[in-house]
Structures are given as C-alpha cells and as structure tokens.
Amino acid sequence: MAEDYLKELAETRKALLNILEDVEEARERAEEEEDKTKAIVSNLADGLIVLDWGNRIVLINSQGEKFLDVKTKEIEGKSLEELEKDPIEKLVKLILKKKKLYREELPLEKPREFVLEVTTVLLSPRKEKVIILHDISREKTIDRMKTEFVSFSAHQLKSPLTSIKWALKMFLDGDLGKITEEQREVLSKTYQTNESMIFLVDDLLSLARIEEGRYLYKLIPVKIDKIIQSAIDSCQKKIKKKKLKVEFRKAKGKIPEIKVDVEKIKLAVENFIDNAIKYTPEEGEVIASLSFNKKEIEFSVKDSGIGVPKAQQEKIFQKFFRASNAIKIKSQGTGLGLFITKNIVEAHGGRIWFESEEGKGTTFHFTLPFT
Amino acid sequence: MAKTILVIEDDKFLRELITQKLLKEGYDTSEAVDGEEGIKKIKEEKPDLVLLDLILPGIDGFEVLSRMREEPNLSSIPVIILSNLGRKEDVEKGLKLGAVDYLIKAHFTPGEIIDKIKAVLK
C-alpha cells in the first residue's frame, strides 16, 4: 500500500515539475516577447507615450523623453494634469483640448526649436491612449526655405520690371521724343505685358507671405462695408468701360465692426469684385451683398459672367489654376487670386465657397467670424 | 527758382530715368547712389525734396530717415519714399520715421511720381 502511495506521489511530483517547466518556458517566451516589443518601442524614431484610462503615464520611449526633455522616472504613473514643466506642458494642453488628434502641429522652443506632429490613438478595450510624436522640423525648414526663395526671387524681379515700366511709359508719354502711332501701339502692348508681370510678382510675394505664416498682421476692428465700398469705387473706370450694372446690397441694421487684418481682407474683397468684373461680359450685372448674424458676417459677389465649367469647379481654389474659359477671355492672369483669397479667409477662421453655372454666372461667398 | 530734388537710388537706370523726367518737368536734380552719399548731399545741398529708396548698400533708407530726424535743420525737408518694399510693416515704419509719402516703385509711373512731388511742394 505504502509502496503504491509513494509511486503515485512520485508521479504527481513529476507531472507537477513538468507543468512548472512549461510555465517557466511560457514565462520566458512572454518575457522575450515583451523585451522585443520594448526594444522596438524604445528604438522608434518617433516619440511614443502610452496613457491608461485615467490619463496616467504608463510608458514613454526614449525618443519621447528626448523630445520632451523628461525622464521616465520623473513622469511614470503621473497623470497629465500633474505635468507642468515646459515643454511637456504644451503637449498636455494640446492633448486635453481634443479627444482625438491627427497630425496636429506642435511648435516647441525647448529643449531646442522644433515642430512635432502629434497623433493620438485610442486602444479600445482598456481605454488606453497612445500618443505618437513625429518630428517634422526638417520638412518645416525646407518649406520655409522654399518660401524664402520665392520671396527673394520675386523681390529681385521687381527692380528690373520697374525700370522697364518707367522707360516704356516715358516713351509713351513722349518724354523721349515723338513716336508714331504704330510704335505707340506696340509699346502700349509691351507696357501692358510688363504690367501683368508686375501683378504676377506681387501675387507671388503675397503668396510667399501667406505661406510664411506672417501673413496675418495686426487684427483691428473695422467697418467691413467701407472696405467693400472702396473696393467697388476703385473699379469705377472698368465698370463704366464695360457698362456693367454694379450694386452693393447691405443687410438692414448697423453692421458690427469685425476684427481683421485690414490689408489682407481688402485684398480678398478686391479679388472677388475684380474677378466678377473681369469675367462678366459688357452690360452684365454684378451684385455684392453683405449680411451678418450673431456669429459671423457673410460677403458674396454674384455676377452674370461666364461661369466656371462644371468639370473644373473643384480646382478653382488651387494654386495657379485658371479655368479654360477664363484663359480664353483673359490670356493674362496668375491663377493665384482665389488661392490667396482662400488662404486669407481661412487664416481668419472663415469659410469660402461658390456656386456657378457656365454661361450664366457665378456667386462667390466668404464668411468671417466675429471672434 | 527751380526746386531741387535729390534722388537717392542705387539702381543706375532707374535713377537716370527719374532724373530725366524731373529735368523735363523743370526741376533741378541731384543724385546719390547710397545712403552715405545721400546724407552727405542732404546736409550740403539742402534739397527741396528727397526721393528715397529703402534698400541701399550700407546705410539703408530707414537709417537715412532717422538720421535726418535727429537734425532739426534737416527734419523739415520732405522725403518721399520710393521703394519696392510693399509690406505694411515697411510702409508704417517709413511713415512713422517722417516720410510724407510712400510710393511702391512698380505701381507708379514717372508721371505719377511727378504729380506726388508737385502735391508735396505746393
């Protein structure tokens, strides 16, 4: 009996040892896996932070530590609200503002000047959150260099274009001796061509300025209806020449002042009106309207012009794009006007859109919010 | 007596063109190719009006304006800025430093510049 019992015991022991061995193996495998994951996470070129459901920091990889100038020891287990040191504080503010971030840019000054692109991913079952930090400083630098190059070259072009303009004008004015009718005609056309080149350079410069981000200058409260009226007034010559009927319809009531970058909004308004006049045939109609509600003002310009061909409508705000029927009427044009206008409006937090039917007319709209 | 206009402009061709136009309109002219020479001629010749470019080798146009402001007997000479710098910041800076007008070169013809000069000297 005792012998049987001992034998059974020995077998049980063996079985137990076997199980233990298996467990040990499984544990080793799991550890290996964990090590692998850890190695991958810590060697990523992107910064990575994992938060638990209560926004406490579970993990930060070494790239993340470097980006944010922190050590794991200092922040592990802490909740986001507790982190008040620059630059991590800036990141925390951004994360707490929105539930989900996708490629949101975060410019940082410390530990060095650079720009991070922040994306957050929610891991659903346990509500953990992964924050991915991607360094886009290099892209930003290249982009800035490109803009500076455009700005620099455009500027360099201005001086010779000015000389040409002045010289041609002096010929045309007879300052350099009498000229024949034939000569005048050719010189006039040359002068006009040079003028459109100056416009192109101006547009390139505004474009470069928009992209440099220093485009919005000083926001000051203005009466937008005054800006619209003066934009219309400055086109009177062209309006008379084309015998256009131009109207400005203002909403009833006192139009509240709105905070804008005056020079830029002027440009946006002028672009709308200028386009309407340019692309509306003689004796056509242009109606500018201004309305407002509690949140925003809306400015629109309706014309009885050539319209935008349906197939090309989605491209109308693209850089350098000009509709085929517009090119036919006006061969000179930069294709930058509406692109610039869109940038200006959006930099102010407004919206821009249009409706158009080829051969009937177009209405362009933009809104500007009061805050 | 004809009024004297001092043209401070580093581009030779532009300087020649505007000078020629000024002479044709009956003004006396004087020329300077940079800020340094400009200041010297302002002091020596006391012109009736200065046409001032902003981007100049050495002392730039803004500096010329600020130096003129420091000297009471020069600060009364009217200065019209004639530059291709068109940013609002530049325009405001120029006017703040005491220029009577700010013309963007590429947007004005010689004739229109003369009109501005006439308006200032009236």
Image (cartoon, helix red, strand yellow):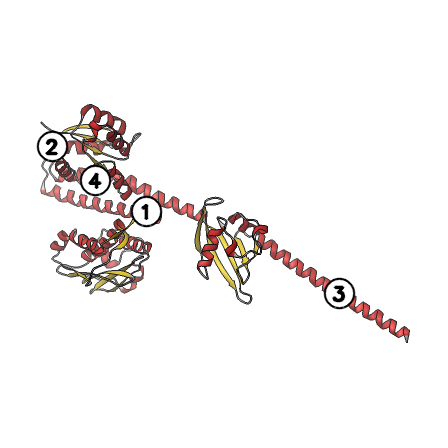
Image position, residue B62 (x, y; %): 27, 34
Residue designated by label 1: A209
Residue B29 seen anywhere in this rendered image of the structure: yes
Residue B64 circle label: none
Residue at x 31%, y 61% (from the top left corner):
A314
- Which mark lies nearer to you, 2 or 4? 4
Q: Chain of mark 3?
A: A
Circles 1, 2 touching at the beta carbon (< 8 Å)? no
Marks 1/3 same chain: yes
Q: Residues within 10 Å of mark 2 (few under 14, many from 20)?
A: few
Q: Which of the numbered marks, if any, corresponds to residue A20?
A: 3
User: Mark 4 packing: few (<14 Cα in 10 Å), some, or many (20+)?
Assistant: many
Q: Is residue A95 left or right of residue A313?
A: right
**Residue A303, position in %: x, y?**
19, 61
Q: Which mark is residue B103?
A: 4
Distance CA(mark 2)–CA(mark 4): 21 Å
Residue bearing the label numbered 2 = B24
Do the numbered discs 3 and 4 sit on residues whose CB atoms are within 8 Å? no
